[in-house]
Image (tube, rainbow, N blue to C red):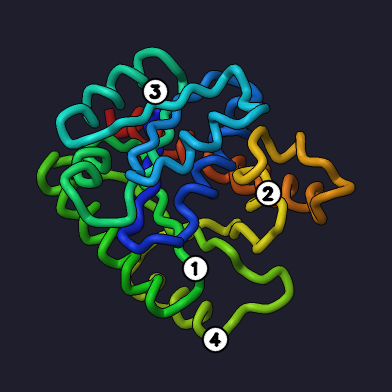
Amino acid sequence: MPTIVFANPKGGAGKTTSALILATLLAERTPVTIVDADPNHPITDWAALDGKPDTVQVRSQINEANILDTIDDAAEKTPFVIVDLEGTASTVVAYAIGRADLVIIPLQAKQLDGKQAARSITLVRRQEQAFRRPIPHVVLFTRTSAAIRTRAHRAILEQLDEHDIPTLRTELVERAAFDAFIAYGGTLDALDRTEVNGVDRAIENARAYAAEIIALLRDERADVRRSG
């Protein structure tokens, strides 16, 4: 079953938000396990609040001794495994990337974030060498503006293109709803529209993002079948 790993050595890049958005949308149709490998345990904290879907399981207390067993066990029990990694380059991060069917590298459209994301891509390529297999990976822009594309954003896109680094067409726009459902618990759809602005637009954005991920996984699997 697909294991989707969210990695970026810079904290605050949007790993937890993008991982939880994807997990809760997938969980509308199928069971999902989230491996919370962030030492701050943000997803474990979310899961302790009211409203967690029954189709979402969260594994925590992750370290380099148990990360591989945890991912493998989760992959046997649920159709999707989502791994939210810590914001550093570590053995845990390297091990998880080695197990990934897809690595998503979230980043904000800032030069510093772009440089840190490059470290994640380097780590992915090292793990490709170590495991002697391609590890699909893609950059996801987070907290972008719905109205304008900044100069820094355009520059990072050009740099990624020059180095043949794929990016998702869908970007997660800066939305109060994305922060709110992590803080309050539950899902995007369960948010109170009278208290949180832009919920429906956030859901539309989130569904486009999830659909693109699913399509990407299907394409990768089709490529494997053709090569086999």
Which residue is the extreme one toward the top?
77
Task: Classify mark 2: helix, strand or loop.
Answer: helix
User: Residue drawn at (46%, 20%), measured in percent from left and top?
Assistant: 79
Residue 145 relative to residue 93: left or right: right
Q: Nearer the viewer, mark 2 or mark 1?
A: 2
Q: Earlier in the sequence, mark 4 or mark 2?
A: 4
Residue at mark 4 to residue at mark 2: CA–CA distance:
29 Å
Residue 24 relative to residue 108: left or right: right
Identify residue for label 4: 151
How crowded is the residue under tag 2: few (<14 C-alpha within 10 Å), some, or many (20+)? Answer: some
Query: Which of 150 and 220 lies nearest the eye of the viewer?
Result: 150
Q: Earlier in the sequence, mark 1 or mark 3?
A: 3
Residue 134 relative to residue 65: left or right: right
Q: Nearer the viewer, mark 4 or mark 1?
A: 1
Which residue is the extreme one toward the bottom?
151
* Amino acid beneath label 4: Arg
Identify residue for label 1: 108
Identify residue for label 2: 180
* Amino acid beneath label 3: Met
How crowded is the residue under tag 4: few (<14 C-alpha within 10 Å), some, or many (20+)? Answer: few
- The quadrant holding residue 171 is bottom right
Count the marks: 4
User: Residue drawn at (69%, 59%), measured in percent from left and top?
Assistant: 175
* The N terminus, quarter of image: top left
Task: Classify mark 3: helix, strand or loop.
Answer: loop
Residue at mark 1 to residue at mark 3: CA–CA distance:
29 Å
- Where residue 92 appears, x then y in whole percent? 21, 42
Task: Classify mark 4: helix, strand or loop.
Answer: helix
